[in-house]
Structures are given as structure tokens and as C-alpha cells.
Image (cartoon, coloured by chain):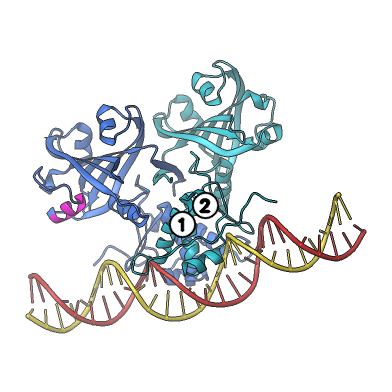
Chain colours: A blue, B cyan, C yellow, D red
Amino acid sequence: MTAEKKSKLPVLRLDPESRAPLHAQAEQLLRQLIRRPEYSEGALLPDEVSLSRTLGISRNTLRAALSRLVAEGCLERKAGIGTRVVEPRVKSGVGAWHSFTREMESKGIKVETFFLKASVLPAPAEVARALQIAADTKVLCVDRVRGWDGKPEVFFRSYLHPRLGLTSQHDFRQPLYELIRAEASIVADQSFEEFTAMAADKPMARRLAVRQGTPLLRRERTVLDTGRRPIEFALVHYRCDRFRLTLNLRQG
Amino acid sequence: MTAEKKSKLPVLRLDPESRAPLHAQAEQLLRQLIRRPEYSEGALLPDEVSLSRTLGISRNTLRAALSRLVAEGCLERKAGIGTRVVEPRVKSGVGAWHSFTREMESKGIKVETFFLKASVLPAPAEVARALQIAADTKVLCVDRVRGWDGKPEVFFRSYLHPRLGLTSQHDFRQPLYELIRAEASIVADQSFEEFTAMAADKPMARRLAVRQGTPLLRRERTVLDTGRRPIEFALVHYRCDRFRLTLNLRQG
DNA sequence: AGTCATTCTTTGTTCAAACATTCCAACATT
DNA sequence: AATGTTGGAATGTTTGAACAAAGAATGACT
């Protein structure tokens, strides 16, 4: 038996008096809906056909509202599965990196990955905390650079949990998550994230081919597996002049 | 006669071989299109009906692509006018604050503004640089708090250029840009911005009704007038638990 | 000349319908 | 038990159509 409960159809009613468009009203109702406790734990929403019938609007109109909530990071849709509320953690609005790569490619940008080096070293305190291991446990640290048109744009440093059994002998030119998936765990699309602004120090400036002191965006990211155990702690640095942060109101 | 040229229909062709959805392909083509010089200065795009015919897709499918570019800030649509390319300057991803207020209200959130205090003081170095005035020139500093449901969410500190002729006697409970507009300049929708993460110090914690040390988002914003002269330098502080930053690739 | 109503162009909204794709679960087969 | 197949349920894609609303241009009237 699954932990997923099929949710009963909630009572939702639009205001026929309002001059606001139906998709806007639906969006607002959905916002209220997913703030309710029964939806706050990543539960599945009713399917689109039922929901549109409940609201008395067409499926297209409902989907317009849903799409905006998805774009905002409040909801997540999967074909064949359903629509679920994204857990209100400190989560990326961007989603996992591999989906970002896909998104880039859909925009006609071919992302290239360069492997720099892999080394085994005692976990720094911050890394040990994120991976839930004892400090100074040996972890694998992989440095990579991504970019396009031959120019580096993003620097990745990944600390991988020892449980994965990866060594510096593996081929890190292929996508990291393929490697992890092949090796052991299933990567869950969950992560805790944090952004900070900083200036490029000397090694970082070299890696990204920018001048020292260039503004960078530092992103910390902890990726979990399906059992909610930490798999990877990543430090990612973006060039501020190539990436943009936008501010959104958080739900709930 | 207007400076607007009605643009000729550009030649755009989708790839019938591609397995990518039509709306994604259209989005990609539009991205290339608006990067061309004839569209880089805020020119009007061809109307939706013609464009959809040119692309060989339905108007609905085209609009899906357009809507994403609008949401991203690349395009701007107005009923009765058309769709124009947004100028690719270093511009807020959020747009001007008053539009954010409007957006909030469209979501059913009534934004309230509280005026705290206005004082005249010598410009700190950072402020002087942003406003392009000599250090220690007397400037007007206005502190305000915005929020909803009676709870403070955002703290604003605005330093206003002396050229505007505003004094602490003005009524700062009304929207600031109305005041500026009435007083002198025309506010251009242009700004330079920067985000930083920080922890709440004592006075900030009091203003936002949070505990000291709460993570905050600090936003610096310089607003220009139509003549590209600085009007306002604003320091805005958001509660990290209520607002979210998302990462986007910058256009251009 | 100025003002108002009309009309045209353009985006905004909404619907119904059909088919494709993805995933899961149940069943059948080895 | 392991594997393969199939069908159902969900989202994804796309179309055509009609009308609403906003803005600009036109023309009529004062």
C-alpha cells in the first residue's frame, strides 16, 4: 500500500460576480488550497479533469493557472503521475541541474562540461554537516566547469557521500547523476539550497576566466536520495553578469 | 508620423523533424528573432495572427511561447497595441516596485505601506557614488515598511537625489514615485540592482519584527530618470523566509 | 480647431475536443 | 521469482473558434 492518499475533491468556488479572469481566480483559489494542511506535505492534487469540473472551468483555463504556480515553484507536474505540492523547504526554484541543462538545450544552447580534477580529502566541517558524516571522514571532491561556446560560465565543486562508493578513478566527464544512479542510489529531486553573493578570489577567477574580484553568485546545494539521505553537497559559482537572480514571493 | 515601423514578417521556420513541442520551438525562434538588431530597440513584433500563420502553428501555441518570454521579462504585451521587445538593459528582473504591488493585488494580497521617518543627512560614500553627488552632500533619507495582513515584510530606505527638491515635509505615505513624478522628473523603468544575503542586526530586526540574526535579503537599487540621471538609491531588506530568489540565465 | 462616437487592429479569455506521452499497477509469461 | 505486456490514469500538446477588452485612428459634428 502506498502512503499517497488520493485526495478527495475539495470544495472550491469561483466568484461569478468578479471581473477578474477565471484563470486568475483559479490561481488564487489554488494558492489557498495548497496552503491547507492536507496539501502541505507534498500531496497530490486532484487530477486536472476533476479539478476543472469542480471549478466549473475548462481544463485549458485551469492549466493556465497551474502552469503559473509550476513556474513559480509551488507545484510540480509529472505526466502519468499528477500534480503535487512542492515541499515548502528552502528549495531551488531552478530544480535540479540536469533539468537546467535540458532547459538550456531547449533554448538552443549546447552546454559543455569540463572535468578539472577529483581528489579524496577529509571533509571540511560544513561538508560533514551537510552529508551527515563525522568531520574529517574522507570524501571524494570533484571539480568541474560548465559553459557554452567554449567559454566557462559555472564552476562546480561536488562533495560525494562515501556511501556511493565512488573513487577518483571513475569517469567524471559523463553526467554525475548517471554515475550515481548506476553506482547505488536513486537521486531524489530534492535539495536544500542557499545563495550568497561574493567576489571571485584568485583560484575561482582562474577557473571562470574572469578578473579577480568579479561578482559571483555562490550556491550551496545538498542533494538527497529517495530515502532522504544526503548524497552530494555541491558548491556552485555563477558569474553575476551571466546569471540573474529574481525575487519571488514564497508561498505559505 | 510615428517612429514605430510596422515590421515586415520575418522568415521563420520550425523543424518538422524535431521531436520538441511546437511551442518550445517557437520560443526558441522568438529568442533568436528578438536578438536581431531590428528588434533590439523595443520595436513591435508582428501581430500574433500573422506570426502564427508565418510559423504555421495556431495562435494558442504561439501565445504559450510568447507568455513565457513575457514572464521572463524579454517581451511586453499590451492589448490594442502589440508586443514589443523590452530593452535589454541591466534591468530589474522584478520590474519596478509599483508593478510588484499590482501583481500582489492581482493575487488577492493587499499591500500596506507604513511611513517610518524622513530625515536629511550627509550622503554616505556608497550613496554619494550611486547618486553621483559629492560625498557628504545633504540628501533626504526616507524609511518605510511594507507588508500585508498587518505584518511587516519589507523594509525600504530610500536616498533621494537633491535635484528632486523633496523635503522631509512632504507626505511620504503616498507612493514615492507619484511624488517624484509630480515634483520634477519622469521615472524611467531602469535600475541597477544587487542582492546580498545578510543577517538582521538589531534595528532591522525591530523594523521587520523578526529575531536578531534572522536571514535577510539585502537589495541595492539605483533608479534612473529618462535622462539616465540617478534619482533614488534604495536599500531594501526582505525576510528570506517570505521571499525567494531564483536563478535565471541573463538574456543577451 | 476641438470633441465625440465609430471602427479597426491587437491582445486577452475561454471553451471543447482530440491525440500523444509518461508512468504505474495489474496481469501474464518465462 | 524475474521479466514482459498491457491497460488505465494522468499530464502534455495542439488545434479552431468565438467573443471580450483595450487602444489608436478615423471621421462626423459642433
Q: Is residue A239 left or right of residue B117?
A: left
Q: Is residue B113 magenta?
A: no
In this view of the protein, can residue B209 be seen by the observer? yes
On screen, D5 above or below B133?
below
In this view of the protein, can residue A11 be seen by the observer? no
On screen, A232 above or below A60?
above
Q: Earlier in the sequence, mark 2 or mark 1?
A: 1
Tell me the kind of residue under disc 1.
Leu
User: How far from the left and from the top, in percent, is residue A108?
Assistant: 35, 55
Q: Residue furthest top?
A: B136
Q: Which residues are magenta?
A: A175-182
Q: Which residue: 47% across, 51% down?
A: B36
Name the foreground residue: C23 vs B124. Answer: B124
Q: CA distance from mark 2 to mark 1?
A: 10 Å
Q: What's the chain of the residue with tag 1?
A: B
Q: What's the chain of the residue with tag 2?
A: B
SS under mark 2: strand
Q: Which residue: 8% across, 45% down?
A: A169
Q: Is residue B94 left or right of residue A222?
A: right
Instruction: Report which residue position mark 1 lands on.
Output: B30
**Are the residues flagged by discs 2 and 1 in contact, CB closer than 8 Å?**
yes
Q: Is residue A176 magenta?
A: yes
SS under mark 1: helix
Tell me the kind of residue under disc 2.
Leu
Q: Is residue C18 left or right of residue C1?
A: left
Q: Quadrant of residue A36?
A: bottom left
Mark 2, other Cα within 10 Å: few <14 / some 14–19 / many ≥20: many
Same chain for the residues under marks 2 and 1 in the image: yes
> Disc number at residue A237?
none
User: How far from the left and from the top, in percent, is residue C8?
Assistant: 69, 67
